[in-house]
Amino acid sequence: MNTNHTNKTLTEQTIANLCAQSFIKLLAGIEQTKGRIAAEFREIVESNQKSFQLALNEAEALAWQTEFPQLFFPDLVVEKVQVVATWKTRQQSVHQPQLAFARAA
């Protein structure tokens, strides 16, 4: 009977280890995706670090609410970063005419 208990304990430990390893791989994959997105949107990252980080965090939080975060995270983060890029472009276009007007005066 002790052998059965030992086998059950080993099986539970093996399953727990496999789950932990899978979770670690999942986290590593999400971190790799963050790095690739940061490289792709380097200009935005450099000029809007805080907004970019907020976009990453929001996308990650949304992804973790799904059943398959590793599948949804890349699309969510690209969408969120594109919103930051659009905002940055809009801000630049709003400020440019004011600078030109100020120089003319």
Image (cartoon, rainbow, N blue to C red):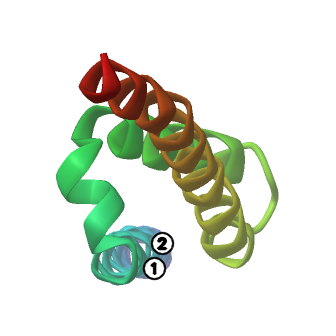
Measured in 3D between alpha carbons, the distance from the residue under mark 1 to the one under mark 2, in whole angstroms, is: 5 Å
Q: Are marks 1 and 2 in contact (CB under 8 Å)?
A: yes
Residue in the image at 45% along x and 79% along y: 22
Residue 72 appears at what percent x and percent y?
A: 74, 68
Quarter of the image for residue 23 reads: bottom left
Residue 101 appears at what percent x and percent y?
A: 41, 24
Residue in the image at 37% along x and 34% along y: 100
Amino acid type of disc 2? Cys
Q: Secondary structure at mark 2?
A: helix
Q: Residue furthest right?
A: 67
Residue in the image at 75% along x and 68% along y: 68
Amino acid type of disc 1? Ser
Residue 27 appears at what percent x and percent y?
A: 38, 67
- Label drawn at residue 22: 1
Left or right, 1 with respect to 41, comes to right
Q: Is residue 53 above or below residue 25?
A: above
Left or right, 4 with respect to 29, comes to right
Residue 8 appears at what percent x and percent y?
A: 50, 73
Is 13 or 40 nearer to us in this picture?
A: 40
Circle 2 is placed at which residue position?
19
